[in-house]
Amino acid sequence: MFESIRKHSKIAMFLLFLLIIPSFVLVGIDSSYFSAGSPVVARVDGQDITQEEWDNAHRQESDRIRAQRPGVDAALLDSAQARYATLERMVRDRVLQAAVKEFRITTSDAELARALNEIPQIAALRRADGTLDVEAYKALVGSQGMTPESFEASMRRDLAVNQVLGSIAETAFASKAQANIALDALFQRREIQTVKINPADYASKVQPTDEQLQTYYKAHPALFQQAEQATIEYVVLDLDSVRAGISLNEDDLRTYYKENVSRLAGKEERRVSHILIASPEDAPAADREKAKAQAAQLLEQVRKSPGSFADVAKKSSQDPGSAVQGGDLGFFARGAMVKPFEEAAFALKKGEISDVVESDFGYHIILLTDTKTPRQPSFDELRVSLEAQLRQEQAQRKFAEVAEAFANGVYEQSDSLQPVAEKLKLKLQSASNVTRVPASGVSGALANSKFLQALFSAESLEQKRNTEAVEVGTSQLAAGRVVQYTPALTLAFDAVRTQVHKLYVQEKSAELARLDGEAKLAAWKANPDAAKGLSSPIVVARDQLQGQPSALVDAVLAASADVFPAWVGVDLGAGGYIVSRVNRLVPAPAVDEQLMAQRQRQYVQWLADAEVWAYYESLKSHFKAQIKVPKPSNEKMSAEN
């Protein structure tokens, strides 16, 4: 029966289609039907953020960072902390968008126009009369894959969102007196003497029995676990592998040469001389007209006697750099001069003098003295670079097609990667001791958390089937298969006895150091003259730790300044225990007015940041923002083997 269905699969699919569709019509399609595979990871104002949306957003953010910083550690981008930060940004954006909607915040045309003019690339498109070069503007936003309408709508949204928190930040204020009180406490100094009780000095006193070590081992199983591991096979499809499979014929290569030789040869260069009558664009209109009239007179003069151009330039041009050279500017290509000047220069014939040309600098008279057309290199000279460029272009065009074949191949023959590797001429790679979390120093697919998640999925582990094709980078797909799997386990006591002994001694030594330190602290508080072993006095502050632990500096600065000497003790755990005598308060050194003003501005900024954060937290509560996945710890617990 099943063989019959396989032979007539199209007919069977049609019959199933007829059976399934009426059931949807009769009972309706649940909205969760198509989204059931993507769990909800956060919710804001009743709107869900799904795992798929989170994955897509993080992939885009990672791609953006990789493009800006090619050398960034891939494992860092794919860490749990980086992924969670992306989710927090998504929640923040949703909260602010909800606030814009509820509070009916809008962006006026004037605000939009002002913001657009503050973008240098757009401001550069303004003509001399102040109008915008619309075609150039369309080309600029088009290069970002947008129309002017969609770009401006996006700008309106961003400006509206910025108003939500910006309005709070702008209200932050602190008087000089308030700022000085806070800053005085911040930059205050204390003179201290310290003595450190080191755990290593107590290690010889710790002689654990086997029973004590066994008890410690049983009480701390997480310290002696070996993480689950897998031996895998995997294949990677990227532009390099697609490019390697492309063969070029001679005709294609020669056609590509003909189509691109002018571009590859380089730009035409022109040599001009000019006479400038300077008049900045912000000069009064009367002054501009006067300068233009003067330029017109000089134009009439040099057109009557073209041979006098250099002498007139030396005498009358107001460009000090070129006037002494008879107005000569040397050779330049397109893009080197302001647009009006460039357009006029490249429209002239050799020996021709332009009309008066207006630019932001004033009014120019331009003489084209020479041209330099680059030599067109021969086909043989460019052959190597042409092959590389054409292969790259064809690989980019072909990648989507090959990617589909790759995805289908790993799915249809899910018990092996060998067929798709052979079909697409990919290298079948292997790796051992692979874990769910990217290992330090790895790169590529093995540093991608989504790929590792697919490898360690229940289906992959239990059935040893290929994973789906996973996007692990820009134009880069990977699929893998678990060959051997070792679940997480607690190592036997005998295997980690040395480690257990080491950790036990460290913990008990630190405990003895702490007890001794606390005893010294109590004794010296009662009788300061009994203190021994204190260091020479040093002055510490929050911005001058003097090599001391920040926990100690925080403690001595928090000590009461009513009575000196004061005594504080700080437990550094495995780092030991420090007893500190606080001798006196040292006022913050006087600073000049400029630095004080800078600090006061910084204080207001800190105050604004605190108020913005508090307001954002209230918005999160108002819109019932929830993140449904646990926040990863910044500390990674591991055991030495």
Image (cartoon, rainbow, N blue to C red):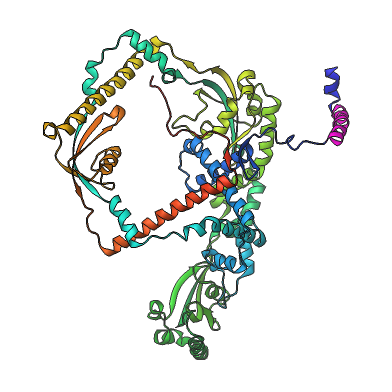
**Front residue (pair 77, 339):** 77
Image coordinates of residue 36 in percent, x first then y, are 70, 33
Residue 579 sits in quarter: top left
Q: In this view, does 41 lie above or below 486?
A: below
Q: Give the range drawn in magenta.
A: 10-27
Quadrant position of the C terminus in the picture? top left
Image coordinates of residue 21 in percent, x first then y, are 85, 34
Image coordinates of residue 146 in percent, x first then y, are 64, 57
**Front residue (pair 443, 620):** 620
Residue drawn at (85%, 28%) of the image: 16
Q: Can residue 310 be seen in this view?
A: yes
Residue 16 included in the magenta stretch of the image? yes
Residue 185 included in the magenta stretch of the image? no
Residue 162 sits in quarter: bottom right
Residue 153 appears left or right of 586 = right
Residue 197 sits in quarter: top left
Q: Is residue 517 above or below residue 537?
A: above
Image coordinates of residue 240 in percent, x first then y, are 57, 39
Main SS, magenta residues: helix
**Front residue (pair 107, 391):** 107
Question: What is the tally of numbered marks visible in this picture?
Answer: 0
**Front residue (pair 494, 596):** 596
Quadrant position of the N terminus in the picture? top right
Residue drawn at (55%, 75%) of the image: 340
Q: Can residue 246 be seen in this view?
A: no
Residue drawn at (59%, 60%) of the image: 262
